[in-house]
Amino acid sequence: MVVGCQRARLAPMRRREGTGAFARRLAAGALAAAVFCAGRAGSQPAPALPPTLHASLVTRILAYDHRIPLLPAGAVVVAALIDPSKKNEPAAALEELARGASIAGRPLRVERLAWRSPDALRADLLRLQPVALLVPRELDGAVEQISQVTRALSVLSIGSTDVAVRAGLGLAVVRRGSRPAIVVNLRAARAEGASLDAALLGLSELIGEGAP
């Protein structure tokens, strides 16, 4: 399916929500356009994706997790780890986007969590019951500790660097030249209980056990 770049940028996220194979194909086309069309302008790509683009892609990706419709009624909760000493732009962008976003017809709620220790993270995730955990690049050095907790509690971890996803996060939204790309660590994502739709996997770079 070919979707115009401008149309993909303007399409409201909630219009792409729905059930059934046809709705998933439409959503896949829109996500593909967002991935392949974003960032064409400019010859000097930044080291990281713009926070608003990263947040937008994260919310679209979550719609492909088959667990979402099975959650108890209410908002879809995404936890965002932060480093208190940093600006934490990814978390702020996701919070801003959540004000008008929905996933599978459910409102999105973002909860900030300061990284302190694995035990503190476990307690926070048990309290909030999020479906996913956003991990900023500033915490790439703690990925091994973080992923042990997310696997134990079935929370999909989402980073923003190749280093993080190869170290054990479930997936990452990264930059490839001037464009974004989705990298899925199949082994890690499955260990975190994620059930990602084949349409999303078809748009992603796959690593880990089971990758072609």
Image (cartoon, helix red, strand yellow):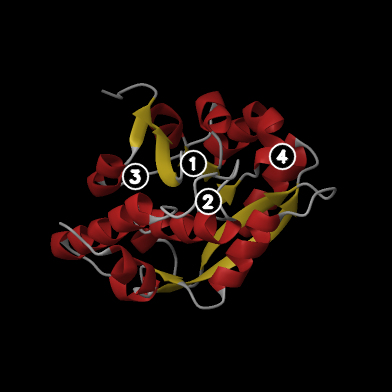
Residue 75 coordinates in the image, percent (x, y): 51, 70
Asked whether residue 110 appears in the rendered view, the answer is no
Could you tell me which secondary element the residue under label 1 belongs to? strand
Crowd around label 4: few <14 · some 14–19 · many ≥20 (10 Å): some
Q: Nearer the viewer, mark 2 or mark 4?
A: 4
Crowd around label 2: few <14 · some 14–19 · many ≥20 (10 Å): many
Label 1, on which residue?
Answer: 175
Q: Which of marks 2 and 4 is nearer the N terminus?
A: 2
Label 4, on which residue?
Answer: 138
| Alpha carbons under labels 1 and 4: distance apart | 16 Å
Residue 166 coordinates in the image, percent (x, y): 51, 25
Total marks placed: 4
Instruction: Name the residue: 41% across, 55% down.
Output: 38
Q: In which quarter of the image is residue 143?
A: top right
Dot 1 amino acid type: Arg
Dot 3 amino acid type: Ser
| Alpha carbons under labels 1 and 3: distance apart | 24 Å
Q: Earlier in the sequence, mark 1 or mark 2?
A: 2
| Alpha carbons under labels 3 and 2: distance apart | 12 Å
Instruction: Name the residue: 56% across, 36% down.
Output: 161
Could you tell me which secondary element the residue under label 2 belongs to? strand
Q: Which image quarter holds the N terminus?
A: bottom left
Crowd around label 3: few <14 · some 14–19 · many ≥20 (10 Å): some
**Residue 132: mark:** 2
Query: Please, is residue 143 above or below residue 131 in the view?
Result: above
Is there a contact, CB below 8 Å, between mark 1 and mark 2? no
Label 3, on which residue?
Answer: 195
Q: Earlier in the sequence, mark 1 or mark 4?
A: 4
Pick whichever, 9 or 41, lies toward us. Answer: 41
Q: Which of marks 4 and 3 is in front?
A: 4
| Alpha carbons under labels 2 and 4: distance apart | 18 Å
Query: Please, is residue 195 above or below residue 112 in the view?
Result: above
